[in-house]
Image (spheres, rainbow, N blue to C red):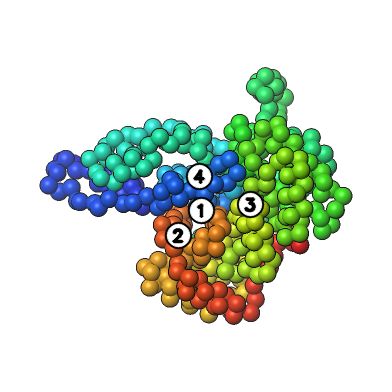
Amino acid sequence: MGFSFTTSTPTLNFTINSSSSSTPFKPPKLPLFWPWQKVKMGPMTVSPMGFGTWAWGNQFLWGYEESMDAQLQQTFNLAVENGINLFDTADSYGTGRLNGKSEKLLGKFITDIQGWCLFHLFVIFVKMCFWSSILHMIVFSGQKRIQDDIVIATKFAAYPWRLTPGQFVKACRKYNQRRYSLALAISLIVEFDEDWFSRASRDRLQIEQIGIGQLHWSTANYAPAQELALWDGLVAMYEKGLVKAVGVSNYGPRQLVKIHDYLKARGVPLCSAQVQFSLLSVGDDQLEIKNICNSLGIRLISYSPLGLGMLTGKYTASRLPSGPRALLFGQILPGLEPLLSSLREIAERRHKTIPQVALNWCICKGTIPIPGVKTVKQVEENLGALGWHLNSDEVLQLEKAASESPRKMIQNIFQTR
Ligand SMILES: NC(=O)c1ccc[n+]([C@@H]2O[C@H](COP(=O)([O-])OP(=O)(O)OC[C@H]3O[C@@H](n4cnc5c(N)ncnc54)[C@H](OP(=O)(O)O)[C@@H]3O)[C@@H](O)[C@H]2O)c1
């Protein structure tokens, strides 16, 4: 009599059977990337790809429902188990009453992973007789506690009332234990809104220090007077040790240089800049931003690297997603065939899939893509973007095909020059 146990991860598939003769031989699987291939990001090192969590809590665009939480937790665990340690979120993610849900879910999943790690150790122990686990242990031995290794990059919205550095400190402050206990005691008598306890990012994330505190957008286009307050907010969060590093999002080339110089003068290094960067969103601005990042030592994080799903090959002009994306996809997809054909052709030749090729292109351009994921299947597939590289001819072929698409992605309304 035997028992079998199978996980759905690419690196952990195994079967145990008491009859050794029937144990199938599994060749060792190499990690998707080696520790020395991790990317330096300010004082931290991160995986060459991260994952985005905009959809976690967003009903309007992404059709989130609370029944998806168990699945989302599995996607998080699977990513971490495969060495992914960068997760992007924002204090404004989550629609309506679910505002902050993405941070809350990440907080829960990071906390729960402790228990999950004990289980994982048991799994590794059982797997000791397999080569892959020995390799896994050698490669990742000496790593810090998994929780300590996870880098949360959260974004702080430039809300109009965030006008002072203090507002930013408050946005990521963690309530101290005494105040929390007092509030808890009062809540037994007076009914409190659940969100009262989790108004700040560090509360929702349940972490002491945020990895990267990013400005979600610049107000330079519509409220230039507020811009300096935002920058001072980053400085305050960094100086108080609430964040390990600071970054920006939706900053164009001109604003990026300005904020870099300002922060530098205040002794704060700018570690990352995230922009919409994909085969559907690569123009002069993106390339200029990339060059500036290279020369100033800033990491470029590619958001929407799959063009919100258009670069996965699963949508066509006659097979559109439900919800508001259909409107945008309906305009872009009819002209996207040359690009999708190139992606498909390279994918077939390489025994990869279309999203894997699209994400690998972002990595080949020297950026860190953060594809949004909602299912275990999507994580499994997107992990396959790691561990190989397109050659320069393939990169050129894709870029040529991309340039033939008549319509590109619309740019974020907050993107500055
Ligand atoms: N700074 C900013 O202003 C900003 C703006 C946007 C995004 N972001 C960040 O960037 C992250 C990623 O961008 P995004 O979510 O906008 O778009 P994306 O990564 O281009 O697309 C993600 C969507 O594509 C689909 N997908 C992902 N992997 C797939 C696969 N292997 N096969 C088939 N479909 C797949 C899923 O949606 P379906 O299954 O529903 O098709 C998923 O939600 C966000 O989560 C967020 O963290 C930042």
Residue 49: assigned label: 1
Q: Earlier in the sequence, mark 1 or mark 2?
A: 1
Position of 112 with respect to 89 (left or right) is: left
Q: Secondary structure at mark 4?
A: loop
Cα separation between marks 1 and 2: 9 Å
What amino acid type is highlighted by mark number 3? Answer: Ile
At 63% from the left and 67% from the top, the residue drawn is 281
Of tags 3 and 1, which is closer to the observer?
3
Cα separation between marks 2 and 3: 23 Å
> Which residue, given by chain and number where applicable, does mark 2 sit on?
385
> Which residue, given by chain and number where applicable, does mark 3 sit on?
298
Q: Earlier in the sequence, mark 2 or mark 4?
A: 4
Q: Secondary structure at mark 1?
A: loop
Q: Earlier in the sequence, mark 2 or mark 3?
A: 3
Quadrant position of the N terminus in the picture: top left
Of tags 4 and 3, which is closer to the observer?
3
Q: Earlier in the sequence, mark 3 or mark 1?
A: 1
Position of 17 with respect to 118 (left or right) is: left
| Residue 61 visible, this orientation | no
Q: Is mark 3 within 8 Å of ligand 1?
A: no
Packing grade of label 2 (10 A; few <14, some 14-19, many >=20) is many
Please tell me whether residue 177 is drawn above or below residue 148 in the rendered image.
Answer: above
Cα separation between marks 4 and 3: 19 Å
